[in-house]
Image (tube, rainbow, N blue to C red):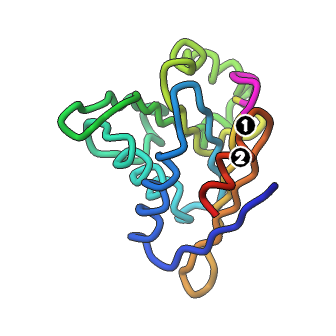
């Protein structure tokens, strides 16, 4: 079951991320894809807000991964690991570089969001959610949610 959601503004993208956070739990892996500027980090900012994590969510392109701990004052309930594999795609062995990040060490206790991670991180868990964001000419975003295994289809259905 694939679900497509249209988002007209960046605020809509943030709000959808908050809604998506409502169906997330520790151990979840989300793979975000889409062209540069599509809204992957904006969606992750909404997810972080919905999870109640500490710190500003910014693109981890140059640091590769950021860990955002739950903030009890904001109702935080689970850690968010936000990784960006964009630069790793140029590496001779991007999977080895992903292994060096030790994402597998935290994947069971955190919600892990990986931008540009398709083909590199799926092996971390048995089930995951693919999220494709496409930016249209009028600046609306089409967000395609594709559940892969587990109970993702039922959780995605809650969002439509």
Secondary structure found at label 2: helix
User: The residue tagged with tag 1: helix, strand or loop?
Assistant: loop
Q: Residues within 10 Å of mark 2 (few under 14, many from 20)?
A: few
Query: Per the image, is 45 magenta?
Result: no
Res. 118 image quadrant: top right
Q: Nearer the viewer, residue 87 or 15?
A: 15
**Which residue appears at 64% of the width and 71% of the height?**
142
Query: For residue 124, what is the image quadrant?
Result: top right
Residue 125 position within the rendered picture, expressed as x and y whole percent measured from the top left: 70, 23
Which quadrant, please, contains the N terminus?
A: bottom right
Q: Residue furthest bottom?
A: 138
**Residue 69 sits above or below residue 30 on the image:** above
Q: Where is residue 100 shown, x and y percent of the image?
A: 58, 15
Give coordinates of residue 150: x percent, y percent. 76, 32
Crowding near the residue tagged with mark 1, few <14, some 14–19, many ≥20 C-alpha atoms within 10 Å: few
What residue sits right under mark 2 in the picture? Answer: 154
Place of residue 146 in the rendered image (x, y in percent of width and height, measured from the top left): 75, 51
User: Relative to 116, is 123 on the left or the right?
Assistant: right
Q: Identify the magenta region.
A: 122-127
- The C terminus is located in which quarter? bottom right
Residue at the image point whose x is 62% and y is 85% from the top: 137
Q: In the figure, is residue 49 to the left or right of 39?
A: left
Task: Determine whether, in the image, residue 52 is placed left or right of residue 79.
Answer: left
Identify the residue position indicated by label 1 in the image.
151
Residue at (62% x, 40% y) in the render: 30
Q: CA distance from mark 2 to mark 1?
A: 6 Å
């Amino acid at each position: 079951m694939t679900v497509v959601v249209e988002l007209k503004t960046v605020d809509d993208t943030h709000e959808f991320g908050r809604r998506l956070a409502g169906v997330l739990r520790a151990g979840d892996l989300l793979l975000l894809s889409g062209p540069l500027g599509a809204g992957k980090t904006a969606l992750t900012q909404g997810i972080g807000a919905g999870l109640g994590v500490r710190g500003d969510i910014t693109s981890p392109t140059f640091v590769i991964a950021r860990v955002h701990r739950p903030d009890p004052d904001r109702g935080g309930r689970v850690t968010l690991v936000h990784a960006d594999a964009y630069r790793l795609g140029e590496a001779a062995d991007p999977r080895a570089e992903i292994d060096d990040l030790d994402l597998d060490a935290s994947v069971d206790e955190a919600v892990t969001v990986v931008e540009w991670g398709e083909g590199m991180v799926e092996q971390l868990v048995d089930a995951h959610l693919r999220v494709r964001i496409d930016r249209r000419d009028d600046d609306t975003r089409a967000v395609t949610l594709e559940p892969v295994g587990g109970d993702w289809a039922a959780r995605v259905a809650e969002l439509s």
